[in-house]
Amino acid sequence: MNSIKRKDALDFIDSFLTTEEIAETDLRVALVGELIEAREKRGVSQRRLESLSGVKQPVIARIERGASIPKIDTLLKLLTPLGKTLAVVPLKKTHPLNEYKSKTSNGKGECGIEAQGSL
């Protein structure tokens, strides 16, 4: 029953978001997920990450719970002490942005950003 309600809610949200907005949200969720996973795997608290990165703990908390959209430089500050970085890589062919033709890309929607690194 909950999965049906969740699907209905996601369908409703998708009905008023563009393909680009959905892809941006998916990317943001994936990046923050990578950040949280890397931090937890290393056993680093938000407070400790503050001292390692220079990003204040309340900012880290807001980013992790999705209440704040981080700038790229902030993400880099947070990922670097966790042994990760950002890289521009080709998107998978099934990615929603492949349908979106960007004026600034090659028109094929073939660039993306992901967190990379080893723990």
Image (tube, helix red, strand yellow):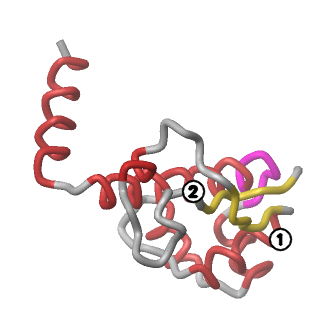
- With 20 as the anchor, is 70 left or right in this view? right
Q: Report which residue position mark 1 lands on.
A: 81
Residue in the foreground of this view, choosing between 27 and 110: 110
Query: Amino acid under label 1?
Result: Pro
SS for dot 2: loop
State the image coordinates of residue 103 (x, y, percent, origin top left). Answer: 40, 76
Q: Quadrant of residue 47?
A: bottom right
Contact check, label 2 and label 1, Cβ < 8 Å: no
SS for dot 1: helix
Query: Amino acid under label 2?
Result: Glu
Residue in the foreground of this view, choosing between 76 and 16: 16
Q: Report which residue position mark 2 lands on.
A: 110
**Which stretch did the figure color magenta?**
39-44
Q: Residue at x 69, y 78 (%)?
A: 50
Instruction: Name above or below for residue 29 compared with residue 8.
Output: below
- With 118 as the anchor, is 103 left or right in this view? left
Q: How many marks?
A: 2
* Residue 100, magenta (yes or no): no
Marks 2/1: CA distance?
29 Å
